[in-house]
Image (cartoon, helix red, strand yellow):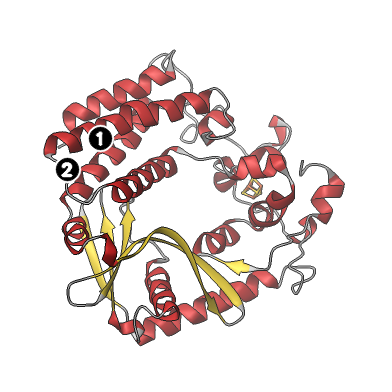
Amino acid sequence: MAADPVLAESASGPRPFSWSASRHDTFASCRRRYYYSYYAALEDDEVRRLKKLSALPLWAGSVVHDTIESFLRTNDTLPSAEEQEALVRSVVHSGMLADWRESEAGSLRFRLFEHEYDVPVEQEDKRLAVTTVMRSLKSFFRTETLRRALAVGRSQWLALEDLVSFHVGDVEVFLRMDLAYRDRDGRVVIVDWKTGRGEGRFNEVQVAGYALYATERGWVGDAEEISTELSYLVIPKAVRRVVTGKMVQHARNFIARSARDMKALLVDPAGNLARLEDFPMCDRPQVCRRCNFRRLCFPRAVDGPPRSAADAPPRTAEATPHTPSAGLASAGEESLRTTG
Ligand code: SF4
């Protein structure tokens, strides 16, 4: 594992350098976390396992995306209200509960950060995850976007949860495209389902990235012929954007600058080789406390980042039910009754 000095100091990436928004985010948050995520994880099973840890809000978002993808792959019409309700119930009561139990049992397929690091989970946190999933899926069925996509038919769909790439200079840029389709007027509409509330720092770059990809694929002659839609399912609201030449240029510059900063830390940029000692640990305990790689940086508890009451509330009978799985189920039951 990465604590092994030989592996940690000589870990290298056999893959060519590439760029993504999450890679930029990781680099900005902590250089050491970036090294573990994009270099050490390629060679080390334990680092790879830690990298894959989910966390409650992230998990809720994944459940929503997976459910929407699965629905769109297998349905051509809008289900009845009863069928929608049954689907949402099944996602929470079967899918999420099964995930939770797997995570508790230490599964390699799905593991929550909270279970890995024994972080107490408040009933309110579980309720929030369940509510996010239920509200998002209910909103999804009501979106105008879904109606339009079903109306044009899947023969007009260009992408569905595809990991796509395009180039900025010699750097390959990856992004995930939730849904793209050609509307009745021949315009390409690119949709991004969002389960958070914030606009996000990368939205403009992301939107321009969609345009760059669509142009590279020949879907449109010009990036400005694309409509993008950021569909905030929890709120719910849809933000439609028209791509401008200025946005595309800004995105190109942003990506090129970010990639240059990342490559500057490589011991061999052409070979995409990295050494642990060139990627310092950050000095922000609040970031370390929520980091998947905490145990690698602080192998002894006494070395760990200082805890605060706000970060890790003390365990109490109320805060931590004796059977956490049952706690999730009851969070789901309650949300089923209260979400509209
Ligand atoms: S625990 Fe802290 S220093 Fe270590 S990788 Fe994570 S954020 Fe960086």
Is 183 situated left or right of 329 in this image? left
Q: Is residue 10 visible?
A: yes
Q: Residue at x 65, y 44 (%)?
A: 48
The residue under label 2 is 79
162 or 256: nearer the viewer? 162
Q: Quadrant of the C terminus?
A: top left
Q: Quadrant of the N terminus?
A: top right
Amino acid at dot 2: Pro
Q: Please, what secondary structure does the residue beneath circle 2 have?
A: loop
184 or 176: nearer the viewer? 184
- Which residue is the extreme one toward the right? 6
Counting other residues with Cα less than 10 Å from the Cα at mark 2, is it few (<14), some (14-19), or many (20 or more)?
Answer: few
Residue 98 x, y percent position in the rendering? 42, 26
- Which residue is the extreme one toward the front? 155
Q: Residue at x 25, y 35 (%)?
A: 87
The residue under label 1 is 87
Please give the label number shown on residue 116.
none
Question: Earlier along the polypeptide chain: callout 2 or callout 1?
Answer: 2
Q: Residue at x 29, y 30 (%)?
A: 90
Residue 33 x, y percent position in the rendering? 64, 52
Residue 248 x, y percent position in the rendering? 41, 81
Answer with the quarter of the image where residue 118 lies: top right
> Which-is-in-front pick, marks 2 and 1?
2
Amino acid at dot 1: Leu
